[in-house]
Image (tube, helix red, strand yellow):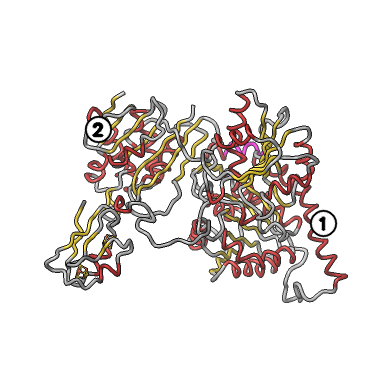
Amino acid sequence: MIPLSKPKKGASGKTGMWRTEKPVLDKERCTNCLLCWVFCPESAIYRTEDKVEIDYEYCKGCGVCANECARGAIKMEEE
Amino acid sequence: MLGREEIERKKIKEEGTTVIETGNHAVSLAAKFARADVVAAYPITPQTQIVEEIAKFVENGEMNAKFIRVESEHSAMAACIGASATGARAFTATSSQGLLLMHEMLFAAGGYRLPIVMANVNRSLFPPWNILVEHSDSLAQRDTGWIQFYCASNQEVFDTTIQAFKIAEEVNLPAMVNLEGFIMSHTHMPIELPMQDAVDRFLPRREHLWKLDVDNPGTFGSMSNPEYYVLMRKGIEDAMKEARTKILDVNTEFEREFGRKYEPIECYKCEDAETVIFAMGTIGKESKRAVDELRNEGVKAGVARIRLFRPFPEESIKSIAEGKKIIIFDRDCSFGKGGVLSTEIRSVLDKPASSYVVGIGGLDVPYTTIKKCVERANGQKDEWITEVHP
Amino acid sequence: MMYEIRFHGRGGQGAVTAAALLCRAGFLAGKKGVQAFPLFGAERRGAPVKAFARIDDEEIVLASQIYEPDYVFVFEEWLIEYAIEGLKKDGWMIINTKKKPEDFDLDCKIATTDATGIALSNNLKVAGFPVINSSILGAFPKVCEEIKLEHITQAIKNYWPGDIGKNNAHACEQAFNATEVKE
Ligand code: SF4
Ligand code: SF4
């Protein structure tokens, strides 16, 4: 075994468990600019045909996306 | 009637100076009680709290020392060397990669014969990153001319650090006190603190035999011919030999003053044992429980926890091992040879011994695992334990 | 007799401090061997964390993790499935919950107390999160005869001098009174 890791989902386990607040996306406001997609440290935001989506299995609730979204399309809500 | 020391001890007890603190805190407190003059250190997990705490002591005036902030561990040791060379009592602390970065300067400290004291929080080495306990970092510094202790409780860390200053200053060698990352550095345990004046009595200021002094100029470590070089290198080896007896003397004196003592090897039920476990650090302590359980099952076991690794207590090891089956636990590995402790112990034995490499990268080593290893040891092959419950 | 205690919480709730406080309470109760340590992983707010405490009459020689605890503390109900692992047959589970012990179907003895509610009513919060360590410890004297409430409240007051200590000790007492047990 050599110390080389490949990117993959959930390298730290199901980080969704860590959440005490969750990001909620308002698709009406979202312009699909992908800023949140770039900044999410868990890669828990993914692109779809339409707008971005949040994978709650792995979203750890850090709030980075809500902070970065210039449109205010993501709000953090209590779990 | 009680003697002065006994009254003092009674007073300590009565004043309730037992604190419950982490191993890291034990180190910071010991540096304070030892009145280190200069502390130069760089933070690294899991040692960081030591540096933070000492910086706090210096900042709030509890400790009358110069705290030097440095940009690396290499510089930390360089600063300690400079300070110690002028006669100051110098202290630092590090761990893992930090210790590796210091490597070159460790030889310098040993070669200059400076009584610097350092706490090293044992941690695994990169890559891949791992911040948990392993003895490989300090064992890789085996040949640097540093005295090396390995502790197993926070009280022992505190006491050994105080002792280390005295030993180092008596034989003019630097001394390293090892405590295990997280298992000790972040574990809360009781520590009985002495009175400051008792420590001052035990550890008086000493005039250095030689030091950098502007009124009496000299150069440390300039170019040397083989004829002189060989004598200076032999001096290090002779000092290590001298340290063997000095360590015992200092321990006796320590016991008189503080009521606790630490042999170079801590033996538990070794005398009538048929099988003796050799280990360092908390594995040596945890083995006591394995020994008790094995004895309940009719296996006459004992454990010898090696506290002093340099100078290596080979005579004691020989006499403890005499006539017994030997099992050695290493929390380290010299790749291509196996456990470092095993290699060293086998070098003084005239019989085969079983060797286990355990607890690598902080893998937990419960007494049940130690017990299992003892049960299946056959003295022949070396084995790596790669699971918590094999 | 050695007590082995395991704490299950998430980063930020104070599980590690709870272990440190409980071992100090053990020391105040006259126990010579006490020890507390976290499970050393990455320290991340919100991530599940474990902490351990051992309390004994003699000096403790063990340094390994606790696999068969006598007591487990559960800071949030969803951690029960982790906490039950290895818990001794006659072991106690102390759960932070609004529910009663009867509401749980578990193969162990159960104590419950609403530590979160009590922490919030005493305004014990750090960065917006309720810190429930001092409250949940209040349940311990109800299930362990050798450690008394005053040992725990004293340990809390020693750990946090001044008003913070007093508030936490008060929350601890309230939780003690609110604890319900089922053998
Ligand atoms: S940053 Fe905001 S607007 Fe941009 S994609 Fe994300 S949610 Fe939509
Ligand atoms: S809260 Fe954090 S982890 Fe979750 S989607 Fe937003 S940036 Fe990603």
Q: Residue at x 38, y 40 (%)?
A: C7
Distance from label 1 to label 2 (Cα)? 68 Å
Does B256 appear above or below C100?
A: below
Q: Residue furthest front?
A: A49
Q: Secondary structure at mark 2?
A: helix
Queried whether the magenta region covers residue B10, the answer comes back as yes
**Kind of residue indicated by mark 2:** Ala
Rendered location of residue C152, percent (x, y): 38, 36
Q: Is residue B69 left or right of residue A53?
A: right
**Kind of residue indicated by mark 1:** Asp
- Span shown in magenta: B4-11
Which quarter of the figure has residue C158? top left
Rendered location of residue C4, percent (x, y): 45, 33
**Quadrant of the snapshot with the C terminus of chain C:** top left
Which quarter of the rendered image does ligand 2 occupy?
bottom left
Does B22 appear above or below B213?
A: above
In terms of secondary structure, what is the magenta stretch mainly? helix
Q: Residue at x 67, y 61 (%)?
A: B116
What residue sits right under mark 1 in the picture?
B238
Q: Secondary structure at mark 1?
A: helix
Q: Chain for mark 1?
A: B
Q: Nearer the viewer, mark 1 or mark 2?
A: 1
Q: Is residue B47 left or right of residue C71?
A: right
On whether ligand 2 comes within 8 Å of the CB at mark 1, the answer is: no
Q: Residue furthest right?
A: B227
Q: Can residue B95 be seen at all in this image of the molecule? A: no
Q: Residue at x 33, y 28 (%)?
A: C142
Rendered location of residue C137, percent (x, y): 34, 37
What residue sits right under mark 2 in the picture?
C178
Rendered location of residue C181, percent (x, y): 28, 27
Q: Are marks 1 and 2 on the same chain?
A: no
- Badge 1 crowding class, 10 Å Cα cut-off, few under 14, some 14 to 19, many 20 or more, is few
